[in-house]
Image (cartoon, rainbow, N blue to C red):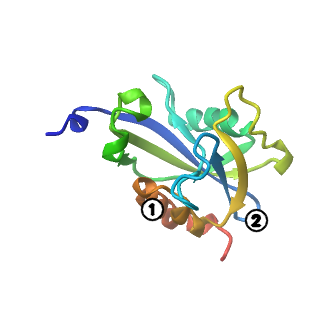
């Protein structure tokens, strides 16, 4: 058994935020803008679940923290928890070395606001430096390799909410 197998998974929520046209919000990580060329720096909003926090409440909190607005409504929930392991080079580095990866509960949400409501600078330590609307089918190609299977599963599960591409 490797050392990483002794580490727990960090509990996390993620948001697939659809606008009224069926496009999905993706954001570029501020400290990671050009990782792996075109893939890797862009991701969906996500974040840790606080102790005793309900995942649905956590997803709204994370939206507020990461994109400056939680003006959205949950329209679906992925039926299972999804998880990924960090690649070996990130074990002991990412998540302050305390976790082997993340176990995530994903939600599809409908954005109820205007584009101008999205404020990446709302938090004093912004996680993202840019955002855009993307087609759901683009998600797997934007993800770092170790998160790609999750984005593929989300693209299938939430396809009924997406713009036809």
Describe residue 98's horizontal placement relative to residue 137 as left or right: left
Residue depicted at 51% across the width and 48% down the height: 106
The label number, if any, that marks residue 42 in the structure image: none
- Crowdedness of circle 1 by 10 Å Cα count: few (<14), some, many (20+)? some
Where the N terminus falls, by quadrant? top left
Q: Relative to 4, is 80 on the left or the right?
A: right
Judge by depth and name the residue closer to the eye, 159 or 89.
Answer: 89
Query: What is the secondary structure assignment of the residue under circle 2?
Result: loop
Residue 69 percent across, percent down from the top left: 75, 38
Please tell me in which quadrant of the rendered image residue 96 appears.
top left
Q: CA distance from mark 1 to mark 2?
A: 21 Å
| Horizontal side of residue 138 vs 91, given as left or right | right
Q: Is residue 77 above or below residue 123?
A: below
Residues under numbered marks 1 and 2 in contact, where contact means CB atoms less than 8 Å apart:
no
Question: What residue would you read off at disc 1?
Answer: 153
The x and y percentages for residue 24 are: 66, 58
Is residue 127 visible to the viewer in this orientation of the structure? Answer: yes
Residue 67 in picture, x, y percent from top left: 71, 40
Foreground pick, 83 / 41: 41
Label 2 CA crowd tier, 10 Å (few <14, some 14–19, many 20+): few
Q: Is residue 114 visible?
A: no
The correct choice, above or below, for 21 with respect to 36 in the image is below
Question: How many numbered discs sit on the rendered protein?
Answer: 2
SS class, disc 1? helix
The residue under the point 71% across, 29% down is: 123
In this view, 61 is above or below 22: above
- The quadrant of the image that shows the C terminus is bottom right
Which residue is at the front of the view, 136 or 31? 31
Q: Quadrant of residue 68?
A: top right
In-image side of 130 versus 16 (left or right): right
Q: Of label 1 and label 2, which has the lower sequence position? A: 2
Q: Which residue is mark 2?
A: 21
């Amino acid at each position: 058994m490797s050392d990483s197998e002794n580490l727990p998974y960090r509990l996390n929520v993620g948001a697939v935020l659809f606008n009224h046209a069926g496009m999905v919000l993706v954001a570029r990580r501020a400290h990671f803008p050009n990782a792996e060329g075109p893939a890797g720096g862009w991701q969906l909003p996500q974040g840790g679940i606080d102790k005793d926090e309900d995942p649905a409440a956590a997803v709204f909190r994370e939206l507020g923290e990461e994109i400056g607005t939680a003006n959205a409504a949950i329209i679906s929930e992925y039926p299972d928890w999804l998880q990924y392991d960090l690649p070996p080079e990130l074990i002991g580095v990412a998540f302050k070395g305390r976790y082997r990866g993340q176990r995530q509960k994903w939600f599809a949400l409908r954005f109820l606001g205007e584009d101008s409501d999205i404020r990446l600078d709302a938090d004093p330590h912004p996680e993202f430096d840019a955002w855009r609307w993307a087609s759901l089918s683009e998600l797997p190609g934007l993800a770092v390799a170790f998160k790609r299977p999750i984005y593929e599963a989300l693209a299938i599960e939430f396809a009924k909410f997406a713009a036809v591409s």
